[in-house]
Amino acid sequence: MPNEARYLILLGPPMSGKGTQAARLTQLLGIPQVASGDLFRENIKDETNLGLEAKTYIDRGDLVPDEITIGMVKERLHREDCRGGALLDGFPRTIPQAEALDEILADLGSFLAAVISIAVPEDILVARASGRRICRTCGHSFHLVFDPPGEPDVCDYDGGELYQREDDKPETVRQRLEVYQGQTSPLIEFYRVRSILREINGDQPIDDVAMDITAVINEL
Ligand code: AP5
Ligand code: MG
């Protein structure tokens, strides 16, 4: 009999606001955020073998190969703090990753509760990239215009230095968007046919997107 853990996916293109919304939702739901991009960036910072290998793909705006990504996320989901569920941000990004996730959750005696798909027009995504700033220590995302920190270049949460991600350069953002269209957007249909997809308009102020997502979760 599956347990009542809540595993949810936040699905959406680069810059759609997955990380921004996940940070709010984890507090509301009491489950951790599992963000594959953040896990890769931690490995890069710590100069692990996985980080060194992933960096070559990330710097080009390509996906890290499935076997590396699946192994990393599987290990994370088996940790104690994910026993009550997790909010997946940036994983899965390919059909094989989605199939692997089903197996991982089945091993944990659970299943996917819902997939929240955040839709934003492409021109808005490109405009968001140039203003994004990330905290070097906690990874929180700010935006110079849409979600500015209280003090320039300083994180509101832990005082860490804010920086611009290397892969937020315009040419890399364009490549990430192409990769999303080719390899990740088919997941929308994959989950729609399973009737667990919930679609959200991500082209609204951050608080309004958060309200829409909360309403969807309350209906579950
Ligand atoms: P990852 O870190 O996951 O990057 P991404 O999917 O490209 O998404 P982002 O983090 O850029 O955007 P987001 O949706 O989190 O938006 P955010 O909330 O920050 O992955 C990086 C790389 O790692 C990949 O390219 C790949 O190489 C590799 N990788 C990761 N996962 C992988 C996987 N599963 N398989 C293989 N490879 C993988 O918001 C963006 C900005 O907009 C912020 O400045 C924010 O303040 C602002 N903002 C947010 N919402 C709004 C709003 N409603 N209105 C106005 N501004 C807003
Ligand atoms: Mg993110």
Image (cartoon, rainbow, N blue to C red):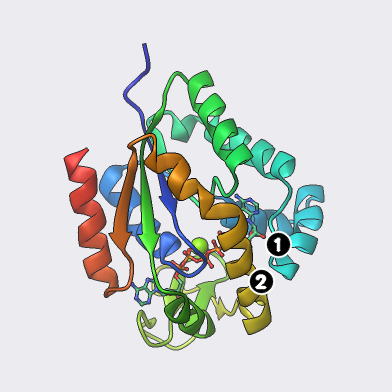
Between discs 1 and 2, the one toward the N terminus: 1
Viewer-nearest residue: 191 or 114: 191
Does 135 appear above or below 179?
Answer: below
Residue at 47% in and 41% down: 190
Residue 31, x across and y down, in percent: 37, 41
Residue at 59% in and 57% down: 37
Q: Quadrant of the N terminus?
A: top left
Which residue is the site of mark 1?
A: 62
Q: Quadrant of the C terminus?
A: top left
Q: Amino acid at mark 1?
A: Asp
Residue at 47% in and 75% down: 122
In the image, the residue with mark 1 has its CB under 8 Å from the nearest atom of ligand 1: yes
Q: Amino acid at mark 2?
A: Gln
Judge left or right: residue 212 versus residue 3.
left
Residue 201, x across and y down, in percent: 29, 65
The answer to whether residue 164 shows anywhere in this view is: yes
